Image (cartoon, rainbow, N blue to C red):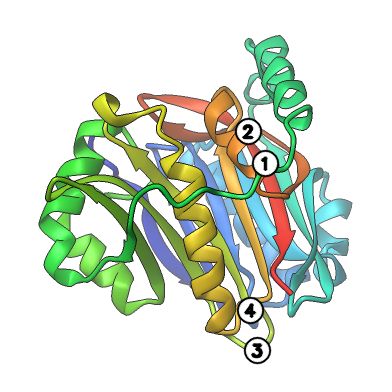
Amino acid sequence: MADVNDTLLQLNGALVQHGRSNDRIYLMDIGSADASLLVPELLELATRRDYGKIFTKIPRSVSGPFLDAGFLIEATADKLFQGQEECLFLGKFLDEKRHDETMASEYESVRELALSANRTKARQKHTVRLCTKEDADSMAKLYGKVFDSYPFPIDDPSFIKKTMDEDTVYAGIEVDGELVALASGECSFDKNKRFSEMTDFATLPKKRGNGYALQLLAFLEDELKKRGILTAYTIARAISPGMNITFAKAGYTYGGRLHNNTNIAGNIESMNVWYKSLV
């Protein structure tokens, strides 16, 4: 997997990821930051580092300063915060070319294909189980085989263990003692959030076509609901029919597309937002 050099920092109470790998700033959590003060700081950082995009995930109630500064609403997720407040996924394009999608027609075809899929209940053909730190080495190897690049170093066992300590729940499927498919829920249990990003889906190439992703998703939804998560969402590769169809089949609502947003599988790609209430 290619090196991932994006870093995390606290910016006046907000959690920010930035770096050359994704050529962007990602406001992951606005936290206690004052939006009117945070926006110019984000713009200054992006200008200084010559990034092409600023991407944010924020409650609608704090969006005013961002929208006034020219941020565009790329996607939404209803009732993401506390199961009540809408989330806005905003994009600010400092490089105008960053907004242009050379594969827009292909993305649209995938979206239409997913939206036409019938809702399906996952059939548990194989046993799905929670993963533990003892699985970290085999998990990292699987991720390293599947992705040429990824926004985070999930091919590093120590990183996987760290995320487990930070409320990421992993599930896996084994066949003949070999871990063949994985997925995770990155949980925010804070009372003001109570949502989870369903992510890190990966299946070994030789084992694809068995419906593992849908089984993993259903398992994680049940597990996270028991733990108090109210809403689930995902940011899926817009070019991937399989993952978009999986979320559509599982009853997720399409929220919009993030233009040229994420470095994954070796290129910066557009991503689709899907969301679902678990209550």
Specify the amino acid type for callout 4: Arg
The mark that comes first in sequence, 3 or 1, is 3
Q: Which mark is residue 6?
A: none
Q: Which mark is residue 191?
A: 3
Q: Residues within 10 Å of mark 1 (few under 14, many from 20)?
A: many
The mark that comes first in sequence, 4 or 2, is 4
Q: Label 4, on which residue?
A: 194
The residue at 30%/33% (across/down) is 147
Whether residue 194 is situated above or below residue 172 in the rendered picture: below
Percent position of residue 113, x then y: 72, 22
Specify the amino acid type for callout 1: Lys
- State which mark lies toward you, 4 or 2: 2
- The quadrant of the picture occupied by the C terminus is bottom right
Q: Which mark is residue 249?
A: 1
- State which mark lies toward you, 3 or 1: 1
The residue at 72%/51% (across/down) is 89
The residue at 25%/62% (across/down) is 160
Q: Residues within 10 Å of mark 2 (few under 14, many from 20)?
A: many
The residue at 41%/59% (across/down) is 184
Q: Which mark is residue 245?
A: 2
Percent position of residue 46, x then y: 56, 46
Whether residue 157 is situated above or below residue 179 in the rendered picture: below
Horizontal arrangement in the rendering, residue 64 relative to residue 166 (left or right): right
Asked if labels 2 and 1 touch by Cβ distance under 8 angstroms, the answer is: yes
Please name whichever residue, 221 or 19, is drawn nearer the observer in this view of the structure.
221
Number of on-image labels: 4
